[in-house]
């Protein structure tokens, strides 16, 4: 091959290479692309199927309709939600805390929302306000830095009243102002009284405790939370 022909071949190869580079798709780092503007971590109630549960899904749907064009992720707490409440809720607190820790590390700009219904509300208590084991429930408290990433908390039928004598909104200096803690009229699970006993099966499945599915409180909580995002 003479010098002129070699130069032409080299030039053609270079142009072909540059064209291939220019036409290749540009890949975006998946971690950055995957971070939503806000994310709901929700713990379902006792004996509900895995996922956010009925009350949780109503809350999430109502919130999604109020956040405009912002993206909203959902993490259903991965825990048994079984009838053996103490170990079940404690496991939920471990999972919820682990997920929040992961989100703070990988998506520090995402505004986090914590939520729970019934036993799931107890899971959120164990990550936010419970400072010591009570009735077999073992807390797994968020650190101060992790708490700073939590924009809002929404709980329904929360048993904190019977264990700690007050709702979450009154008990926590970190979360009180950014929390909505709703108790339906006559709900025995969230009625105050410092009973220091776990809710019974009859209480957990009483009409009053099941009323959140049709009493409008999930939408009420969503309006509060949307105002915090």
Image (tube, grey):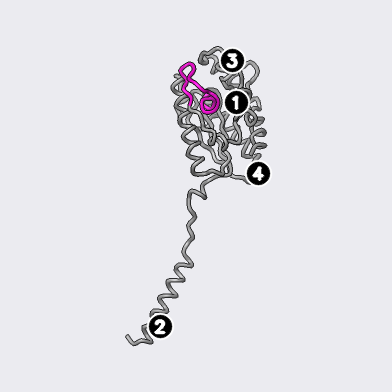
Q: Nearer the viewer, mark 1 or mark 4?
A: 1
Residue 6 appears at what percent x and percent y?
Answer: 36, 83
| Residue toward you, 30 or 176 | 176
Residue 188 numbered mark, or none = 3
- Marks 1/3: CA–CA distance: 22 Å
Q: Disc 1 or 3, which lies upstream in sequence?
A: 1
How crowded pointer 1 is (Cα within 10 Å; few <14, some 14-19, many 20+) is rated as some
Residue 121 in view here? no
| Whether residue 94 is situated above or below residue 208 in the rendered picture | below
Few, some or many residues within 10 Å of mark 3 (<14, 14–19, 20+): many
Label 3–label 2 contact, CB within 8 A: no
Q: Position of residue 82 (x, y in %)?
A: 46, 22
The quadrant in which the C terminus is found is top right
Cα–Cα gap, marks 1 and 4: 30 Å
Upstream in sequence: badge 3 or badge 2: 2
Of tags 1 and 3, the one toward the viewer is 1
Secondary structure at badge 2 equals helix
- Nearest to viewer (mark 1 / mark 2): 1
Q: Which comes sooner in the sequence, label 3 or label 4?
A: 4
Q: Position of residue 117 (x, y in %)?
A: 56, 26
Quadrant assignment, res 188: top right
Q: Earlier in the sequence, mark 1 or mark 2?
A: 2
Q: Is residue 130 in the magenta section?
A: yes
Callouts 1 and 4 close, C-beta under 8 Å:
no
For the residues marked 1 and 2, what is the alpha-carbon distance in whole angstroms?
Answer: 75 Å
Cβ–Cβ under 8 Å for marks 1 and 3: no
Q: Which residues are magenta?
A: 122-139
Residue denoted by label 2: 8
Query: Which residue is denoted by mark 4 in the rendering?
Result: 68
């Amino acid at each position: 091959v003479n010098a002129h022909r070699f130069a032409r071949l080299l030039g053609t190869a270079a142009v072909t290479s540059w064209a291939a580079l220019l036409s290749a798709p540009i890949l975006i780092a998946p971690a950055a692309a995957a971070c939503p503007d806000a994310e709901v971590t929700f713990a379902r109630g006792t004996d509900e199927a895995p996922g956010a549960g009925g009350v949780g899904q109503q809350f999430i749907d109502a919130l999604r309709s109020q956040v405009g064009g912002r993206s909203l992720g959902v993490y259903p707490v991965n825990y048994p939600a079984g009838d053996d409440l103490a170990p079940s809720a404690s496991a939920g607190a471990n999972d919820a805390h682990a997920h929040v820790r992961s989100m703070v590390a990988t998506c520090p700009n995402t505004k986090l929302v914590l939520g729970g219904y019934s036993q799931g509300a107890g899971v959120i208590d164990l990550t936010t306000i419970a400072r010591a084991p009570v009735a077999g429930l073992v807390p797994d408290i968020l650190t101060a830095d992790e708490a700073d990433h939590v924009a809002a908390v929404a709980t329904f039928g929360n048993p904190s009243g019977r264990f700690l004598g007050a709702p979450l909104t009154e008990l926590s200096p970190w979360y009180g102002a950014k929390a909505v803690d709703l108790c339906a009229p006559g709900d025995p699970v969230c009625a105050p009284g410092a009973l220091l006993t776990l809710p019974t099966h009859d209480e957990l499945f009483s009409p009053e405790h099941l009323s959140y599915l049709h009493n409008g409180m999930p939408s009420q909580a969503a309006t509060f939370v949307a105002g915090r995002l």
